[in-house]
Image (cartoon, rainbow, N blue to C red):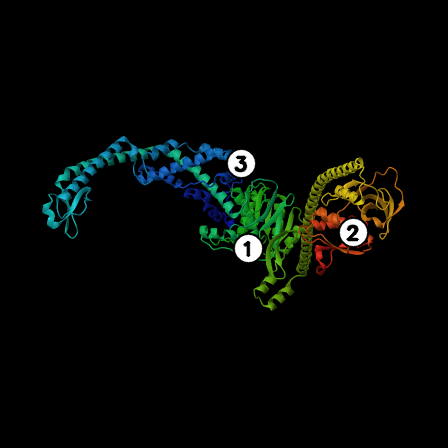
Amino acid sequence: MNPVPAALEFDRVLHLVGSFARSQRGRHRVLATLPHFDVAEGSRLFRLTAEVTRLLAEIGTLGFAGLDAAELLEGGASSELRAGELVQLTSLVRRLVEVRSHLTAYPAAGPELARVVAELPHLEGLLAYCEARIGADGEVLDSASPALAHARAARERRRQEIVVMLGQLRRGLVGIEAPFTLRRDRYCLPVQAADRQRLPGLVLDVSNSGATVFVEPLAIVELNNSLAEATAIAREEEERVLEEMAATFRTRRDELLAGAEVACCLDATQARVLFGQFCGGVLLPPHAGEALVLVGARHPLLDPSLAELRREALGETGNTGAVVPLDLAIGGEERAVLLSGPNAGGKTVALKTVGLTVLMASAGIPVLAEEGSRLPSLSRVWCHIGDEQNVLSELSTFSSAMRGTAELLAVADESTLVLYDELGSGTDPEEGGALAASLLEHLVGRRCWLLATAHLVTLAAHVEQLPGARNAAMGYDEASGHPTYRFAIGMPGRSRGLAIASRYGVPAGVLDRARELLSRGFLAIESYLERLEREIDTLHALQERARTAEAVAVAADRTADEERRSLTAEREAVRDRLGVERSQLRQLAQSKLAEALAELDRLRRSNELPGRRRVAAIRHAALDLGGEEVEAVGGDVAGLMPGNAVHVRGARLDGVVGRVVGDRVEVLARNKRLWVEAGACEVIAAASAATPAAVIEVATAEEPSTTELKLLGLTVEEARERLERFLDRATVGGSRLVRIVHGHGSGALRRVVREVLAGHPAVTRFTHPPHFRGGTGVTEAELE
C-alpha cells in the first residue's frame, strides 16, 4: 500500500465522509480508509458502493445504531456483563438481524451485497432468546424461566397480604393515618413518637427530627419474612438468567464480532454514498481508460456547498465564496501539463483538486465533479506541494524536494500520477530551470501522468518543444487585475509578479527599476504571451458568439418544425372534415333536386303550367342548403362554361374556366385559382369537347368589395374562403393595396393569410405594416 500524501489533506476529507456514518465503529472505519490502487480491490470497492447506492435509492437508509456494543465483547470486556450491557448486546443482535433481513429481501442485490449477506450470521434464534429474557430497560422478564415467574408470583401474593394487613391495622388505630412505607426492604407504618406504645412491633427507623418512628407491626413480621424469602428466590433466579445470557454471548463472541465487522463495513459504505448524495458527487470507476478527464471538479475542502458540513465535522468556518470548477482533459500521447500563471491564481488548488479526486475515487468515495469525468489506471500518487523544509533533519525546502524526487524516479512508471508544485524553485533560477527541464523530459519519457506548476518562463518555452507535454495557464482578468481561477490548456501563463507587487503597494520607483533590469529575452517572451492571450480571448469570444447563433438557429428550426407539423395536422383535420361536409351537402343537394324534379313532374302530369314565381320558389327550395354552397347541375352564366378560355377584364389575365358558382367564376390562370365576377370574364375560345359538363354553385351571400377584410372570429377554412373571394374582387375592381386584419391569437389565421397570399397570382408582395397601423395583427398586400 502506497502512503497517502499528507499535503493533499485526504484525512480531512475522510472526516467529512465519516460524519455520515450511523455508528462510531462505522465512522472509525471511514477514517481508516486508504485508496486502493489494486485493480481487483478497487473494482470491488467501486461495485459495492454502486450497489449500496441503488439499494438506498429503493429501500432507504439503513440503520446501524447498536453496532458500538460490539466493543463489550472485545478483549476481556465480556468476562462480566451486567444487565445494561446485555441490553446493548441484544440491540446489537437486533441490528444485525434487521440489516440481514433488509438485504435478503432486496431483489436486485448485486454480487457484492450478496457476499455481505453471506457473511452476516443467522442470529434470529439468538434474538428471540434474548428478547424473551430481558426488556429494553434491563429488567429480566417473567418469560425468562418458569422458576422466575413462580417466584415473582409468590412475592406478589405476599406483598398483597401485607398491604391488606396494614390496611386493617390502620383502621383499628385512631390517629394513625400516614400511609405504609418501606424501610430496610420491609413494610412498616410511620407513627408519631408519642403514639409508639399504641402499636406493638419492631422499630425499623426514626426520622431525623425524632418525631416519627417507623414501626413494623408484629402482625406482619412473618409476612415480611415470607416476602423477603420470595424476593431472594426471584433475585437469585434473575442473576442465574443474566449469567446464562452472558455465557451465551461469550460463546457466540466470535460470530457476533464478525457480523459487527461486516455491518461496520456496510455502514462505512453507506456513509460514502450519503456524502456523495449530499455534495452532488459522482462515483468514478477506477481504471476506466487511458485519459484523465475532470469536468467541473471542485475541492471538497473549499467548495462553499460543504461549508456547514466542514464546520460541524472539522470545526472550521472555511470558504463560503464561489469556487471556479476545474475542467481538465489529458491523455493519449500528451500526459504531462506544465501549469503557469499569477501567484494566488489557483495553480496549487488545481493540483490538490486533481490529487484528491484520484484518492477519493480510489477509495470508493464519490467525487465533486460532473458526469463525463473519468480516470486512468493508476498505481500510486506522488505529490510535492508546499514547503517541506525540515529543521530537525537539517533539510531545506529544495533538499527535501530533491530527496523526494529521487524516491519518485526510483518507482515512477506510466501508472504514476505526479503532482509537482513549483518545479525548479528553491535554488538558482538557471540551475533550477535546467534541472526542471531535465526532470520533465525524464518523466514524459516514462509516460507518467504529470501535472506541475512553475514560474520559469524558460521552462514553459522548453515544454513547447517537448513532445508529450503541454503548457497550461490559470486565467487572469486584465481589466480588474485579478486572477479568474480558470484552467486553460494550450498556452503558458504569465506570473505577473510586477503587477501583483503594484497592486499590494510596492512603490512605482522600485517597479520601474525592476522593469529596466529585466532581460530583453524575458520582455520579448512576455510581449509574445500577452499578444497570444489577446488573440485567444478574441477567439473565445467569436466561438461564444458562434455557439449562441447556433443555439438560436437550432431553436428557430425546432419552432418551425413544430409549426409545420401543427399546420400539417390541422390541414389534414380540415380536409377530413370538409370531405364529410361535402358528402353531406351532396346528399342534401341531390335530395332537394329530386324533390324539385318531382314537383315539376307532378305539375306537368296535372297539366299545370307554373308561373315565374312558382318556378323561382321551386328553384329556391332546391338550392336552399342552409347557407352552404352546394354543387348543382345547371346551365351557363353569361354564356360561361367550364373549359372556356376567358380574358379577365381589369386583371389583365387570360385563363380557363374551372367552375361557375352563382355569379362567380373560378378561373385557372398561371397555375393558380382565381375567383372573379362573371361579368368580368370575356370568352376567348370554346373549350375542348372532352371538358366535363358545367357545375354551377350558388352562394348565399357575398361580402361587399372593399380594400380591407376582417377575419377575426372566423375558423381557418372560413377565413381562407372569405380571403380568396376578397382578393378576387379586389383584383377585378382594380385595387392595388389591400389590408387583411387577422389579429394575433394562436397564429393560425396569420399562417393561412400568408399561405393564401403566397399562392394568389395577383399578389406581388405582402408584409406587416408598422405598429401604429396594426403591426403583426394585420397583413398588407400589393396586387397587380
> Which is more toward the observer, 712 or 782?
712
Tell me the quarter of the picture where residue 163 sits. Answer: top left
Image check: 271 left or right of 327?
A: left
Residue on which the image places disc 2: 727
> Which is more toward the observer, 487 or 763?
763
Quick check: marks 1 and 3 in contact, CB under 8 Å?
no
Q: Position of residue 745 (x, y in %)?
A: 67, 52
Question: In the image, what residue type sits under mark 3?
Answer: Ala
> Which is more toward the observer, 499 or 511?
499
Number of residues whose C-alpha sits closer than 10 Å to that of mark 2, classed few (under 14), some (14–19) or many (20 or more): many
* SS for dot 3: helix
Q: Position of residue 136 (x, y in %)?
A: 33, 40
* Residue 701 visible in the snapshot: yes
Q: Position of residue 381 (x, y in %)?
A: 55, 45
Label at residue 40: 3
Tell me how far mark 1 sits from mark 2, CA to CA.
64 Å
Q: Position of residue 280 (x, y in %)?
A: 53, 47
Question: In the image, what residue type sits under mark 2?
Answer: Leu
| Sequence-first disc among 1 and 3 | 3
